[in-house]
Amino acid sequence: IVAALDATQHNPPFAPLHIRSDSKYVIDGLTEHLQSWEDRGWIGVSNSEFWRPLVARMRKRSAITTLQWVKGHSNNEGNDGADKQAEEGANKAAPDVVNLNTPAEFNLTGARIATLSQSLAYQGIRTAKTKATMRTSTLVSLDMTRHAAKDISNKLPTDSRIWRSIKSKDIARNIREFLWKCLHNAFRCGKWWQNIPNYEHRSVCPHCGTEESMEHILTECDAPGQTNVWKLARRLWLRKHAHWPAPTYGTIMACGLAEFKDNQDSPRPGAARLYRIIMSESAHLIWRIRCERRISREDDPQQYHSKAEIHNRWLHAINTRLTLDRAMTDRKKYGNKALPSQMVLNTWSGTLMNEDALPDDWIRQTGVL
């Protein structure tokens, strides 16, 4: 989409333009789906922030514009060159700025009442409210997550892609809510307490003496918890993989976007899934330990969590996920919702205790980390 948009922006509107693309999504979007997308007011249309300026600029052109689909990876000189440029762009340290301004005279707004259903109207209202109420802290969190995702996947995701990633089924349901609140900076810690009379002192971490924040809690605090948990997470990861991406607040929120490849540049979905599980479970445990320390144990150093307690609780959390994965491979019980056995094997192989003594298909056998 961006390539087509760039072509319309950098070619004279009075000169004929011929766009060749191996993306049926782009070709079909402009030829088959455009009318229905505009009729519904672009509500629920993915990448509408790119589609709308593209359509407007194509309509603004006075010369003819043609579209042609070409087969990808078929030794087409133009297509191969475009793929090479796309790869170079993905590896840039900083993304290019794309002009998404839509010419006002060609900016079609609103939806046709005849095509508007109640559910579609409600979706449009929710989308409008979301855009109107997006807080600065949320935007900062999204940008932090976006650039962290670039480090672990070489891709810069859109906001919608980030929101979808925290709904990954590889992440436990309660932790999805935790990550959602992290992105919205919705936890009552740090600056939140500065506006509560007589409770301003709660904004400071009593152990470190600095202002508390989710970033501080999950990756910086010296109190027993985060350092111990991340050491355990790193140790488990290195049993199977050579490189451990250092945990940051951004990579925690971007764990659902992680992608890993082997030496042949082939995707490793098992590695990505294990990373999502380790990162999400570890971050959530750190938060729970912090809340227990500050609330139920009232920041009493004598009641701080011991290293053994932290170790056992982290091991329990990971073992619980392993046990759940094994149980979810039962197709007789879960039907289409069952997990593929090979996916579970790819995720956990290499991390089990005494794994050499286990059968190749250890899913039905006892085994712990």
Image (cartoon, rainbow, N blue to C red):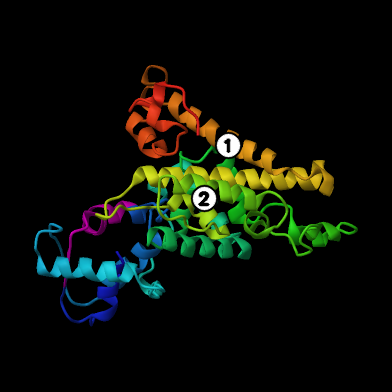
Q: Give the residue number, with chain letter if any, for mark 2.
A: 234
Q: Is residue 167 visible?
A: no
Quadrant of the rendered image containing residue 306: top right
Amino acid at dot 1: Leu
Residue furthest out toward the right: 198
Residue at image location 46% in from the left, 40% down from the top: 170
Quadrant of the rendered image containing residue 207: bottom right
Boundaries of the magenta span: 18-36
Residue 289 picture location, percent across and down: 70, 44
Residue 291 picture location, percent across and down: 74, 45
**315 or 26, nearer to the observer:** 315
Q: Is residue 42 visible?
A: yes
Disc marking residue 107: none
Characterize the magenta stretch by its predominant secondary structure.
helix
Residue 325 picture location, percent across and down: 45, 30
Q: Is residue 359 above or below residue 198?
A: above
Q: Give the residue number, with chain letter if any, for mark 1.
A: 315
Q: Looking at the image, is mark 2 or mark 1 earlier in the sequence? A: 2
Q: Is residue 280 left or right of residue 59?
A: right
